[in-house]
Image (tube, rainbow, N blue to C red):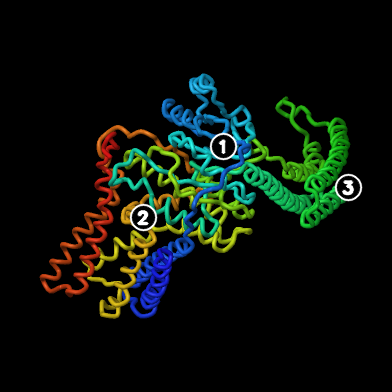
């Protein structure tokens, strides 16, 4: 029955939303103020798409009844990832992991390479893994690199991945491993729950909507994705991704090398010494070899054989050119030796003779330009992944949110995922707004990185439902741009009297109000009583964070600017309330209040009309309610034991 009501609300939202937004575009824009009218309707369109993607997510909400019994001989490695967290916290999780009932090996993956943690692991009979010298001066890929390194030195069929603070229940494998009896299942994700969060959850840490209807809905589309911790993965699937990634990177390298080689040959032909029959013949031969390799690559022939053949021919050509140039150089030297290079001048000092200068500058020397070009071809043709510490990278390294990218690649390969909606591990949430904002920024940056590097809408192998499930998450992080418009529009009207809507007539209200009401009812019905208002507040109130995430991720992907990676602190940060962290939001709130006062004054003095003023003052009140979530968040000083 709940599914019926959910779907009914989705259909009503679709009908009323399209009716409202269609009318807004077609009949309500105030073109005299297009500079605010168009952005506002664009923001509203963004929000409609956002809510429809949510509706699509919960359309197939899947409520699982539990996993069948697991194979008793299934081998499992439990990974506890850490970088700089307190040793006591790490060992608390590691020892809890060791108490998991299903037979397994527990490993501490210490990216901080701390001898005292190594000793503690040894004292308790736990495995300990840290990176070796191979990783020195190589890209480390943060947590993904840590996990990829551990995959090369362990061998369990399945991996349970836990963050350093996520203390597992002893039965976590008993309740999840049975899903892997289906050979197509590669991932089982369980919720992330935090036991240091008070009931009112001022920082919005628990995310009950995401670890509930949203993940359950994605599960219905076979798109429940990896969230970095509290998840079990099939090693075979990860290694397949690693091998596939290696092959794809190698192919890409060869294509780049062949393209560079063609350019190098073209450049070499422009050189003056290319007229030499020998150089011309060598360039022809190398060009033919490159063309043949290009054809073989398109035909799917062995990468090793085709690159070996090209390199063999290029090597032979280079040797011939070098020999020819050595002979030419020898002739040059003999000719130089025969010349009278210097003579005593009128001042009594030896000088270069005019004859030597003319003969040196007028002679054609050895074809070093061509040889250099050919050598560039050789350098470009390398197919080794010399820029990485290890050839295989099973977990995706294209983003700081390796979890989402890895899951998407799994789905594109035809693997299945499961969302098991039962809390089986307990962690620690950020205890101050600065840490929370750092964490949210990293999540958003990583998600946008994935969007820009491997857009799910164009990734081969994904089904359309899966594409939209991934895209919906990425789409949600664009809300910061819409928020600016939502804050700016009432300020502009109340201060300047500029209305982005042509008129606030009955046509507006009979379309807008039903859409907004059904929109909120949809969240209430789909959430099964889960509070969603806090999440809606943060989606708008953190607009500077979301915008920064989008811009920095774009600069990282397009221009190679470093993104940085910060491990989320697991303890509250010292100091008092840090109002400076929300300075943009405070500025917006002040402007909203000033605008409301000005609007009321304008109304009282007859400079504004009543309906527009009333609507926009109400809008200001709504915006202030949205931003109010930050007041308590800034003042929050962490959870005190025994509060709930």
Question: Is label 2 or label 1 in front?
Answer: 1
Earlier in the chain: of badge 3 and badge 1, it is 1
- List x then y, in percent, for residue 455: 55, 57
- List x then y, in percent, for residue 197: 32, 41
Asked if residue 110 is positioned above or below residue 546 in the image, the reply reads: above
Q: Which residue is mark 3?
A: 278
Left or right of 40, for residue 73: right
Q: How many residues crowd mark 3 within 10 Å: few (<14), some (14–19), many (20+)?
A: some
Disc 1 is placed on an element classified as helix
Q: Quadrant of residue 613?
A: bottom left
Q: Nearer the viewer, residue 179 or 19?
A: 179
- The quarter in which the C terminus is drawn is top left
Q: CA distance from mark 3 to mark 1?
A: 53 Å
Q: Which mark is residue 539?
A: 2
Q: Which mark is residue 147?
A: 1
Question: Is label 2 or label 3 in front?
Answer: 2
Q: Quadrant of residue 593?
A: bottom left
Q: Quadrant of residue 337?
A: top right
């Amino acid at each position: 029955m709940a599914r019926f009501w959910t779907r009914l609300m989705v259909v009503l939202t679709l009908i009323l939303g399209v009716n409202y937004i269609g009318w807004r575009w077609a009949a309500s824009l105030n073109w005299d103020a297009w500079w605010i009218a168009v952005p506002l309707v664009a923001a509203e369109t963004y929000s409609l798409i956002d809510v429809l993607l949510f509706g699509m997510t919960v359309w197939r909400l899947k409520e699982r009844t539990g996993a069948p019994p697991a194979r008793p001989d299934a081998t499992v490695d439990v990974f506890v990832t850490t970088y700089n967290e307190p040793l006591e916290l790490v060992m608390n999780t590691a020892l809890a992991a060791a108490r998991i009932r299903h037979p397994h090996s527990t490993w501490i993956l210490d990216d901080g390479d701390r001898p005292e943690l190594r000793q503690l692991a040894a004292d308790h009979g736990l495995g300990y893994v840290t990176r070796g010298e191979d990783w020195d001066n190589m890209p480390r890929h943060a947590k993904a690199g840590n996990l990829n390194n551990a995959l090369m030195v362990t061998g369990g069929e399945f991996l349970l991945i836990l963050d350093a603070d996520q203390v597992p229940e002893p039965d976590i494998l008993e309740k999840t491993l049975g899903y892997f009896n289906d050979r197509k299942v590669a991932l089982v994700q369980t919720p992330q729950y935090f036991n240091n969060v008070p009931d009112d959850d001022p920082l919005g840490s628990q995310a009950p909507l995401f670890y509930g209807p949203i993940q359950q809905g994605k599960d219905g589309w076979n798109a429940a994705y990896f969230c970095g911790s509290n998840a079990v993965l099939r090693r075979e699937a990860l290694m397949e991704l690693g091998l596939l990634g290696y092959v794809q990177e190698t192919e890409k390298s060869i294509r780049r090398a062949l393209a560079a080689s063609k350019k190098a040959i073209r450049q070499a032909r422009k050189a003056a010494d290319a007229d030499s029959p020998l150089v011309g013949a060598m360039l022809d031969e190398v060009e033919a070899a490159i063309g043949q390799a290009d054809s073989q690559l398109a035909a799917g022939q062995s990468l090793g054989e085709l690159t070996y053949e090209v390199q063999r021919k290029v090597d032979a050509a280079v040797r011939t050119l070098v020999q020819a140039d050595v002979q030419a150089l020898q002739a040059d030297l003999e000719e130089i030796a025969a010349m009278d290079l210097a003579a005593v001048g009128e001042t009594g000092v030896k000088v270069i003779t005019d004859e030597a200068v003319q003969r040196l500058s007028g002679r054609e020397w050895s074809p070093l330009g061509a040889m250099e070009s050919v050598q560039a071809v050789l350098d470009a043709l390398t197919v080794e992944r010399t820029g990485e510490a290890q050839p295989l990278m099973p977990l995706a390294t294209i983003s700081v949110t390796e979890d989402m990218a890895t899951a998407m690649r799994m789905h594109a390969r035809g693997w299945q995922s499961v969302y098991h909606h039962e809390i089986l591990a307990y962690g620690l949430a950020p205890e101050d707004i600065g840490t929370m904002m750092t964490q949210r920024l990293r999540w958003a940056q990583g998600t946008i990185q994935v969007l820009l590097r491997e857009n799910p809408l164009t990734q081969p192998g994904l089904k359309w439902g899966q594409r939209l499930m991934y895209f919906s998450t990425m789409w949600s992080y664009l809300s910061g741009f819409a928020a600016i418009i939502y804050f700016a529009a009432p300020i502009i009207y109340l201060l300047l009297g500029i209305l982005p809507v042509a008129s606030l007539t009955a046509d507006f209200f009979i379309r807008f109000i039903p859409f907004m009401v059904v929109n909120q009812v949809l969240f209430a019905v789909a959430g099964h009583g889960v509070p969603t208002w806090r999440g809606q507040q943060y989606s708008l109130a953190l607009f500077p964070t979301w915008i920064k995430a989008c811009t920095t991720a774009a600069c990282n992907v397009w221009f190679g600017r470093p993104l940085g990676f910060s491990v989320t602190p697991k303890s509250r940060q010292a100091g008092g309330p840090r109002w400076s962290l929300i300075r943009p939001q405070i500025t917006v709130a002040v402007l909203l209040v000033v605008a409301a006062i000005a609007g009321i004054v304008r109304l009282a003095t007859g400079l504004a009309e009543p309906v527009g003023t009333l609507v926009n003052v109400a809008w200001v009140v709504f915006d202030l309610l949205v931003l109010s979530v930050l007041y308590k968040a800034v003042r929050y000083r962490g959870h005190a034991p025994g509060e709930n």
